Amino acid sequence: MNHQADDKIIIEQILNGDKQAYTLLVKRYQQKVFRLCMGFMHNPDDAADLTQEVFIKAYQKLSTYKGDSKFSTWLYRVSVNMAINSQRKQKIRATFNFYDNGNETQQIADTRYADENINELEQKQMVKKILDSLPASQRKAIVLSHYEELSNKELAEVMGLSVKASESLLYRARSNMQKMIKKQK
Amino acid sequence: MKNCKHTEECLIAFDGKSTIDKETIAHIQQCESCNTLYANTLSFHEAIHNEKKTQSPPFLATRVMAALEKVEKQGIIQFNLRRELQLVFVGIALILGIFSSVFFNKGHEPAENTPVLTDYFFTENTGIEQQWLNFDNYENEQ
Ligand SMILES: [Zn+2]
């Protein structure tokens, strides 16, 4: 049985009251969702917290999944929207919190990364800075395409766009990324 | 020799794994600005590659299920609390309503208003009503 059909059976079980069946879906998709969250948060702890929130939200909204698309497509849609919301909340918190207002370097160069070398830290900061500077829809497109390696067709499905529109969105995002990369020393 | 514009276009499409044609590579090797752009682009994709390799924490599924349980319990508690609060508010509103009506009624003694009304109705000059009562067509309309 393929994953898609299997997912639908599991979802039916969950909706019929078998909550424990949800563990199977979480285990199946946790790495994908976590990787996607890494693309937005750029640190494993925040990404794990966000992954948890995504799965809770997905469980609460599971009855709205109609089965027209793959479950992974629906889950990606929930994930990217939650990630963007989470980033907005982080920005607001940072604006109002004096301690969070310190530079981003400090946030990333946390003790958790003490074993990483300076070059890797600089690379991490560059990625965060560049991706955060993109408009939300372009950021979503980049994460789905570069982190999740979705095809243009899959990207279009998640974003709710035509394939042409998603290609053009991705091109604009990459083009903006390059402008930012050019500014790097 | 490919020019800078072409190289930039090539690097926009570059995803860290795709191959770049020999001519463009030759230009990158000779042109300083394209060389810097290429190095930074490689570094950028390498960082993404490293982030992608990060494994999700072990027992994440267990953590999610525990959090789900907690959220659902909190939801039930909050729902019950909301219902109880609603009952309390309705009770307070009712009590306030009763007390305020008693309080305001005390302030409005009917005796104080009576003279005004009697003055009005017993006066000879009742204005428009008087004119209407004396209007000729009044009886014809019946
Ligand atoms: Zn050049």
Image (cartoon, rainbow, N blue to C red):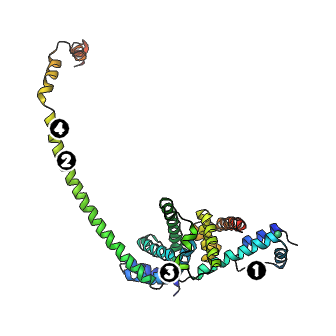
Residue at numbered disc 1: B19
Q: CA distance from mark 2 to mark 1?
A: 78 Å
Of the residues shown, which amino acid type is indicated by label 1?
Thr
Of the residues shown, which amino acid type is indicated by label 4?
Phe
Residue at numbered disc 4: B104
Q: Position of residue A142 (x, y in %)?
A: 63, 70
> Are the residues tagged 4 and 2 within 8 Å (C-beta)?
no
Q: Is residue A159 left or right of residue A19?
A: right
Of the residues shown, which amino acid type is indicated by label 2?
Leu
Callout 4 and callout 2 share a chain: yes
Q: Quadrant of the N terminus of chain B?
A: bottom right
Residue at numbered disc 2: B96
Residue at numbered disc 3: A30
Q: CA distance from mark 1 to mark 4?
A: 87 Å
Q: Quadrant of the C terminus of chain B?
A: top left
| Mark earlier in primary sequence (4, 2) | 2
Q: CA distance from mark 4 to mark 2?
A: 12 Å
